[in-house]
Amino acid sequence: MVDRPAFTIGIEEEYLVVDRETRDLVKDPPPDLWDSLREVLGPQVAPEFLKAQIEVGTKVCAKLSEARDDLSGLRRDLSGVVEEYGAAIIAASTHPFANWMEQEPTEQPRYQRIAADYQVVARQMVICGMHVHVGIEDEHLRIDLMNQIRYMLPHIFALSTSSPFWAGTDTGLLAYRPIIFKNMPRTGVPEEFESWGEYERTVNILVEAGIIEDATKLWWDIRPSARYPTLEMRVSDVCTRLDDAMTVAAFYLCLLGFLFRLRRRNQRWRVYSPFLISENMWRAQRYGTDGSLIDFGRGELVSIADLVEEIIEMLAQDALEFDVIEELRHMRTIVSDGTSAHRQLAVHRAALDSGAGEREALEAVVDHLIHDTMHGL
């Protein structure tokens, strides 16, 4: 029998850097900004594909509460540094009105290669995400749990939506980020792999053909990390509020704990095709917590509100074990009060109703995001 995984947790978040006066993205930050960032945040801060993006990552944490404290400090410290340069960070997966054609890729060999290889597809990637790593040392277990947890990716995603705007347009979706991201290769819901060996053989075909250097170029919604002994969830938008981010992380952690408990009883979650899971992914990005997802076992739509109640009950034992009961119950608050996308849309509508022009209303959304990113720290 496979030993119980460590179930350590680490969280990576990507932010957009905005000018406090124009509210637009900072397209070319001054070089000494990065000197200041590294001095304050050390190795926990890193550039991203575009110059207007910054990524932070927590340390490897034994408990979610440790990850929260670390991430809260990273947001505060990062905000303090960029503020000295007349800028701010927003934890949102798209900017309300930025023009993707004006953005510049980071001047690092990895990102320059991506820009050269993927051309205009890569240049459109003015999007941010949140990645949650959970420590699962056994490679075969990692693949087995990945196969099963794919079913719940739309459920995770629906709780995180923060990208309703794109290039100054209300897209009508609560999350537009996947529309942009899926233009890149090797994205979306991965297929089922029978074993770690099959996964490795599949990846090696692309490596040996010279298409990718390694598995870091697999940008699936969930993947075995190529750098750490973890299963990395990548499906979610970046949550503007830290409380919401912790709920998404707790949900993912508890799901893995639940699936491992099933395995110990020689049971498993039924595996469904990426085709069906992707249908629920579309519903999650279009309607978010306002909508419903297909229960494939029952063959019917079930509201997110009802699903949340089922999930809280199903994962109660795991939430107790991981000490995340309150974080899991916060799912109800997200459903009742809305995600970041709902708040952004409400700010935009309120500004227009008060007589603001379209650009002013979008700038009001940026101001809201600056404030909401610091909520609960």
Image (cartoon, helix red, strand yellow):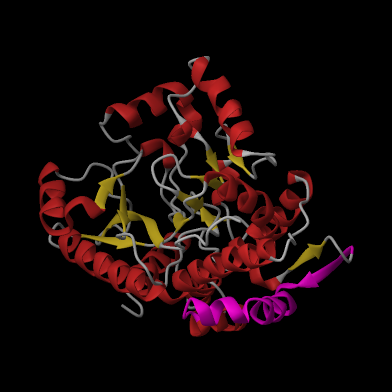
Residue toward you, 67 or 155? 67
**Residue drawn where x is 44% and y is 36% of the image:** 216
298 sits to left or right of 72: right
Residue 96 appears in view: no
Q: Position of residue 354 (x, y in %)?
A: 48, 78
Could you say which quadrant of the image residue 338 lies in?
A: bottom right
41 sits to left or right of 345: left
Q: Position of residue 52 (x, y in %)?
A: 31, 47
Q: Residue furthest right?
A: 299
Q: Quadrant of the C terminus?
A: bottom left
Q: Residue furthest front?
A: 1
Q: Position of residue 73 (x, y in %)?
A: 24, 70
**Highlighted magenta segment, given as a residue range:** 299-324
Q: Is residue 30 magenta?
A: no
Q: Is residue 316 magenta?
A: yes
User: Is residue 46 positioned above or below 57 on the image?
Assistant: above
Tag count: 0
**Residue drawn where x is 57% and y is 52% of the image:** 176
Q: Quadrant of the N terminus?
A: bottom right
Q: Position of residue 119 (x, y in %)?
A: 46, 25
Residue 359 appears in view: yes
**Residue drawn where x is 38% and y is 56% of the image:** 12
Query: What secondary structure is the magenta-colored segment mainly?
Result: helix
